[in-house]
Structure formats: C-alpha cells, structure tokens
C-alpha cells in the first residue's frame, strides 16, 4: 500500500517538485517559515559589530541575512493569516508565498534551497506526527471559531439585506 502524498511545485531546477505527506498543510509551511526566520536572524553575530570596512563584520552580509529573516518572518504570519481567512488555503499557495523572495539571484536560490531542505527535514523528522498534531489543533480551533461566528455573521448580513430591501421599497 502506497502512502498518500501530495506534490509541491518549486522553481528549483534541481528539485522541480517536492513530495510531502497528504497531512502536510499550509500551517506546516508557516511553521517552517518561522524556523527559517529564527535560523536566518543574524543573532549569532552578537558582539561582532564594527564600522571598520576591513573588519570581518563588514563581510558577513548582514543585510542579506536581515532581508531573508524578515521575509520568513512576514511569510509565517501571512500564511497564518491566510489560513485564518480560509482553512482550505492551499499548500501550493503557501509555498509560493514562502518562495517569493526578491533579491540577487544567488540569494533567491539560497532562500529556495533553504525552503526545500527545511520541508524535507520536517517531513523526515521523527517528531513530524507531533508537529502535525499541534497543527491539527490549530485548524480545529479555527473551524470551531468559524462555526461559532457564522450565526452572528449571518444575522448581521440578514439585517443589512433587510435594510437594503427597505430602502429599495421606499
């Protein structure tokens, strides 16, 4: 019996598609994005600051690290927000958001490679099921919140419709 999978299309020539478990969701990519933000933030250069152009610090490409980290930070929350708006937000759309980085070609390729590697590592991680359980809890909470909010939203829309009908009749 073959395990159920889904495929994510990438822009990488070396890896045009990535196969992930059927249980893999957009929130898995938000999780990955947050972890990539954390690993790209140049906090490991603590106590290294120097304004001397010949110093090692000047050659660390801090601005690239900051741009990449900011991109992953923004994507984690953008994907999360998209899932809040639509619990069926697709894995491919989340991946496209995550992979949509503007920068030098080598930096874009580095970002894409980091994403691909992080996906493969998460899927292969012995704790994948545990991460997935936490993500399922997030989805369950969203579905429950939506179910509780729908009657109120329907009532508000019906009230607006009645107001508009009254104006049309007048």
Image (spheres, rainbow, N blue to C red):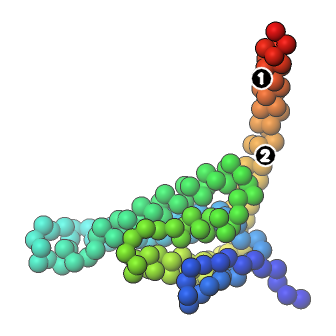
Between residues 128 and 58, which one lies in front from this camera angle?
58
Q: Please tell me the numbered disc located at residue 3.
A: none
Q: Quadrant of the N terminus?
A: bottom right
State the residue at coordinates (79%, 28%): 157
Query: Is 41 or 64 nearer to us in this picture?
Result: 64
Quarter where residue 6 is shown: bottom right
Q: Is residue 147 in sight in this rendering?
A: yes
Classify residue 158 by image quadrant: top right
Residue drawn at (81%, 42%) of the image:
147
**Residue 31 visible in the current orientation:** no
Q: Where 125 sits versus 94, above or below?
A: below
Residue 144 image point, x, y percent: 78, 46
124 vs 141, left or right, is left
**Residue 144: which numbered mark, if any?**
2
Q: Residues within 10 Å of mark 1 (few under 14, many from 20)?
A: few
Of marks 1 and 2, which one's residue comes earlier in the chain?
2
142 or 12: nearer the eye? 12
- Above or below, 49 relative to 3: above
Q: What residue is drawn where x is 71% and y is 63%?
A: 90
Quadrant where the C terminus sits is top right
Residue 154: horizontal and vertical position, in percent? 82, 31
Which type of secondary structure does the marked residue at label 1 adopt?
helix
Determine which residue is flagged by label 1: 160
- Decide: few, some or many residues near mark 2? Use Cα within 10 Å; few <14, some 14-19, many ≥20: few
Q: Position of residue 81 (x, y in %)?
A: 61, 51
What SS does tag 2 mark?
Answer: helix
């Amino acid at each position: 019996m073959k395990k159920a999978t889904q495929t994510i299309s990438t822009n990488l020539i070396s890896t045009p598609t990535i196969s992930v478990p059927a249980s893999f969701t957009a929130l898995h990519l938000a999780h990955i994005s947050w972890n990539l933000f954390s690993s790209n933030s140049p906090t490991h250069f603590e106590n290294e600051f120097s304004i001397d152009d010949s110093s090692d610090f000047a050659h660390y490409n801090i601005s690239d690290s900051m741009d990449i980290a900011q991109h992953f930070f923004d994507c984690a929350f953008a994907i999360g927000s998209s899932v809040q708006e639509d619990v069926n937000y697709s894995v491919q759309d989340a991946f496209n958001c995550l992979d949509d980085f503007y920068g030098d070609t080598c930096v874009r390729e580095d970002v894409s490679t980091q994403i691909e590697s992080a996906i493969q590592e998460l899927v292969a991680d012995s704790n994948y099921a545990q991460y997935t359980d936490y993500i399922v809890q997030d989805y369950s909470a969203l579905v429950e919140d939506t179910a509780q909010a729908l009657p109120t939203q329907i009532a508000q829309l019906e009230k607006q419709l009645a107001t508009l009908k009254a104006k049309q009749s007048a």
